[in-house]
């Protein structure tokens, strides 16, 4: 194996930080060498600082690393951010000012005009925002973000349909409890129940989708000029966000053309054969009752989005469902794929 690039994780003791550690275990390009967390965890070995929630124990490669404060100091050039939104803005900017590349799962910078909100199969060219970001902010480093976990599922479902022209979208989510972190939703609230509200989720899905599916022109992203309406619900499923999608298209493709669009969709990660890229990023399932979280969410290491139940919509024209793994493709795996793309494009290391 070639020498791997050392990376750090901000917010390493939390649930998303643990998913980063698990996803990066044995990665062919990146090696976790630095862990940052709150002051109360700093100075402890990771095995003592973090209550491991993912089954088994923390990987041996990180268990004895000493947790550091979330300050640039001796951190590697590339850091993944699993920071809570309450602290992410200042900390991520401090790292970028100090010359670090921050690949963030936090929401704080997603809608900044000069920050790429990246889904590599869809908008790899949005990395073209980085020169303007560094120039305008006077940074030696840079920040790249991945979207909200439900937004990734929605945009991966819609991206193959862009060639037909997207006009209006109505999306309803059935979101897993793991998306709320740990300890998450109280058991008395979620057991045998559906919670029809997730704070801030609906506007994020609407605005992030328009940015991701937008067009980069002269170092500015012109948002997709489509109307998008989202309803978000928390359901008693452990992993996997299911999204029901109705879409009005400018043209009127038949089912065969839509299925072909799904099945043939790929992007730069597949062309470059990036390590974490799914072989087929959007996979159509013809069964009447698929995809399902329990049966399908772990396929392709959780990095693909599965679509199905394609049929006519009497209101908007076309409707289907999409499923993705919220803590893998919707969080840690998404950020790692972003970093792999940046490495392939020569955007790391100076």
Image (cartoon, rainbow, N blue to C red):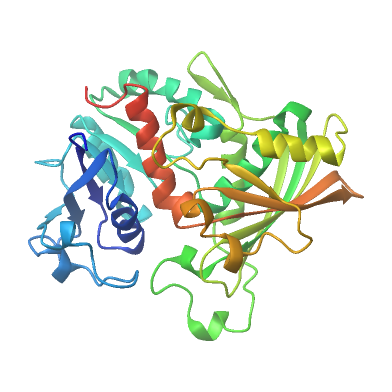
Left or right: 112 in relation to 221: left
Left or right: 260 in relation to 69: right
Residue depicted at 32% across the width and 44% down the height? 89
Q: Is residue 126 visible?
A: yes
Task: Kindly indicate the quadrant of the structure image that contains residue 172.
Answer: bottom right
Task: Residue 239: give x, y in percent of width and height.
Answer: 51, 66
- Rendered position, 153 above or below 66: above
Q: Looking at the figure, which quarter contains the C terminus?
A: top left
Task: Residue 26: give x, y in percent of width and height.
Answer: 27, 50
Residue at the far front in the pictured view: 1
Viewer-proximal residue among 16 and 275: 275
- Rendered position, 228 above or below 127: below
Residue depicted at 49% across the width and 23% down the height? 125
Viewer-proximal residue among 279 and 297: 279
Left or right: 194 in relation to 141: right
Task: Residue 189: give x, y in percent of width and height.
Answer: 55, 82
Residue at the far right in the pictured view: 314
Residue depicted at 48% across the width and 63% down the height? 179
Q: Is residue 107 visible?
A: no
Residue at the far bottom in the pictured view: 188
- Rendered position, 142 above or below 53: above
Task: Kindly indicate the quadrant of the structure image that contains residue 98.
Answer: top left
Task: Residue 57: give x, y in percent of width and height.
Answer: 24, 70
- How many numbered marks appear? 0
Q: Looking at the figure, which quarter contains the N terminus?
A: top left
- Rendered position, 65 above or below 112: below
């Amino acid at each position: 194996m070639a020498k791997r690039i050392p990376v750090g994780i901000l917010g390493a003791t939390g649930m998303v930080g643990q998913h980063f550690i698990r996803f990066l275990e044995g990665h062919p390009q990146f090696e976790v060498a630095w862990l940052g967390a709150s002051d109360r965890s700093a100075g402890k070995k990771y095995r003592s600082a973090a209550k491991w929630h993912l089954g088994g124990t923390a990987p041996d490669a990180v268990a004895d690393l000493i947790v550091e404060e979330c300050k640039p100091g001796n951190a590697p050039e590339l850091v993944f951010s699993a920071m809570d939104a309450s602290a992410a803005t200042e900390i991520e900017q401090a790292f970028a000012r100090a010359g670090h590349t921050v690949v963030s799962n936090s929401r704080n910078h997603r809608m900044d005009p000069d920050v790429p909100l990246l889904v590599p199969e869809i908008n790899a060219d949005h990395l073209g925002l980085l020169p303007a970001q560094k120039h305008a902010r006077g940074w030696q480093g840079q920040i790249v973000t991945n979207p909200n976990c439900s937004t990734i599922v929605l945009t991966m479902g819609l991206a193959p349909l862009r060639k037909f022209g997207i006009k209006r979208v109505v999306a309803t989510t059935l979101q897993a409890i793991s998306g709320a972190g740990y300890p998450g939703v109280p058991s008395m609230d979620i057991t045998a129940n559906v919670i029809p509200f997730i704070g801030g989720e609906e506007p994020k899905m609407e605005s992030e989708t328009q940015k991701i599916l937008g067009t980069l022109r002269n170092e500015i992203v012109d948002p997709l000029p489509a109307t998008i309406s989202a309803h978000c619900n928390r359901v008693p499923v452990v992993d996997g966000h299911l999204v029901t999608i109705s879409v009005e298209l400018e043209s009127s493709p038949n089912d065969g053309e839509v299925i072909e669009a799904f099945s043939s969709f790929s992007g730069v990660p597949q062309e470059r054969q990036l390590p974490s890229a799914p072989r087929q990023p959007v996979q159509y399932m013809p069964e009447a009752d698929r995809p399902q979280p329990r049966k399908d969410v772990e396929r392709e290491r959780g990095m693909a989005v599965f679509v199905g139940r394609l049929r006519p919509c009497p209101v908007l024209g076309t409707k289907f469902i999409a499923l993705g793994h919220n803590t893998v493709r919707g969080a840690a795996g998404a950020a790692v794929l972003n970093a792999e793309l940046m490495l392939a494009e020569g955007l790391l290391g100076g």
